[in-house]
Amino acid sequence: MVTRDDVLSTLRGVRDPELGGDIVELGMVTDVAVVDGSVDVGIALTIAECPLRNQIEEDARRRVESMPEVDQVRIRTTGMTKKQRASLMSVARARAREGAEPTKVAPTTRVIAIGSGKGGVGKSSISVNLAVAMAESGLRVGLLDADIWGFSTPRMLGVDERLEADGDTKLIVPVVARGVKLVSTGLIIETEETALMWRCLMLSKALEQFLKQVEWGELDYLIIDLPPGTGDIQMALTRMLPQAEMVVVTTPQRAAQKVAVRVADMARRSHMPIIGVIENMAGLACDCGRVHEVFGKGGGAELAEDLGVPLIASIPLDPEVVPGGDHGAPVVISGTGSPAGAALRAAAEDMVRLLPPADLETCTGRIAKMLTELEGLPA
Ligand SMILES: Nc1ncnc2c1ncn2[C@@H]1O[C@H](COP(=O)(O)OP(=O)(O)OP(=O)(O)O)[C@@H](O)[C@H]1O
Ligand SMILES: [Mg+2]
């Protein structure tokens, strides 16, 4: 007689190719019922519209059907609950951590990747401004431009220096701009031709260099400006920096369902937990006293709700952001009363609260923080 355990061990042969584990170990098999020769299997997918749905379903069916004494197989797939998804992520992350290769980023450094479901929503502007705001508040911050071909951070920080290697260690020394340690392909290539040469380098190789050959030193935060799209870079990142977490940037446009699916899929592929959502390009305050919702309203809150994470901030559309980015004067500092600048400064503070520097999380660090907070209270 075929037993439930037999079915489970057969199902261990079904792998989720992106997460790199079998569906039993990943907690995707929710139930198995065996009645005589009839087997009923429940499989929870990370998202109901999972692109791998058919493959996983068919693979499971084929394997169970091929078991002796099995006549009939029924596979039911469902979408995971938030709780199931969170526990799957932690299994996947633990696996990634086991195989992590050493980088020059200290394990105590908080790594925050800024990503989005689509391009042009303000990832780079937000990465640069958050990094500068954090550095201004005295934190040690690095900014890694992971947009290897479409880099924009050097321009946004007004840097035209080149990266150089340290004579002794031979490691690349980041350029410091506005208190932020910056590394970007834009600080290496000289001309369009050299840019073309870089194109030949595998994307993930370039990223690997930036993580393994750069003297990052002691950092509280490493902000990573992700390229648009969901691909190799994100995967390579988690492989090398398992502590990386993601902030998702979106516009206020509703009907973000497609974006939500894409973002959930991206996080799933890269096993990166999502810290929260930042909505960008929200209402533009006009001198006439009205607020123009150019890109709609509510998309950030909706996406945060869908993903089960907090909405960290809503950054308004602000004409000062563009020239600030073009002339290396990020609005968080240059903004004389810039609404986007103020919102970005507040966002940086909230992120530090959500994800405090690692050493503040030690017991002593926490007690010290508590005492400081108590000192601030009226007697
Ligand atoms: N809050 C804002 N108000 C006005 N303009 C903005 C705002 N945020 C970003 N921008 C402008 O929008 C454009 C796109 O921003 P940015 O380059 O930061 O987006 P991105 O998501 O990094 O794009 P890509 O996907 O190409 O990397 C830039 O010109 C930037 O100055
Ligand atoms: Mg960008």
Image (spheres, rainbow, N blue to C red):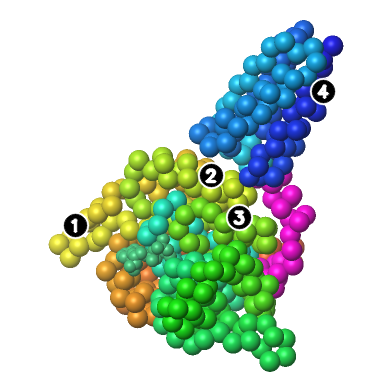
Q: Quadrant of the C terminus?
A: bottom right
Q: Is 191 on the left or on the right of 233, as rendered?
A: left
Q: Which residue is mark 2?
A: 265
In the foreground, 313 or 82:
82
CB-based contact (under 8 Å), mark 4 and mark 1: no
Alpha carbon of mark 4 to alpha carbon of mark 1: how far? 65 Å
Of 88 and 37, which appears nearest the observer?
Answer: 37
The residue at 52%/86% (across/down) is 162
For the residues marked 1 and 2, what is the alpha-carbon distance in whole angstroms?
37 Å
Which residue bears the numbered disc 4?
Answer: 5
Q: Which mark is residue 235?
A: 3
* Residue bounds of the magenta highlight: 89-109
The verdict on residue 137 being magenta is no
Q: Secondary structure at mark 3?
A: helix
Amino acid found under the numbered disc labelled 3 = Met
- Residue drawn 40% across and 57% down? 119
C-alpha separation, residue under disc 3 versus residue under disc 1: 43 Å
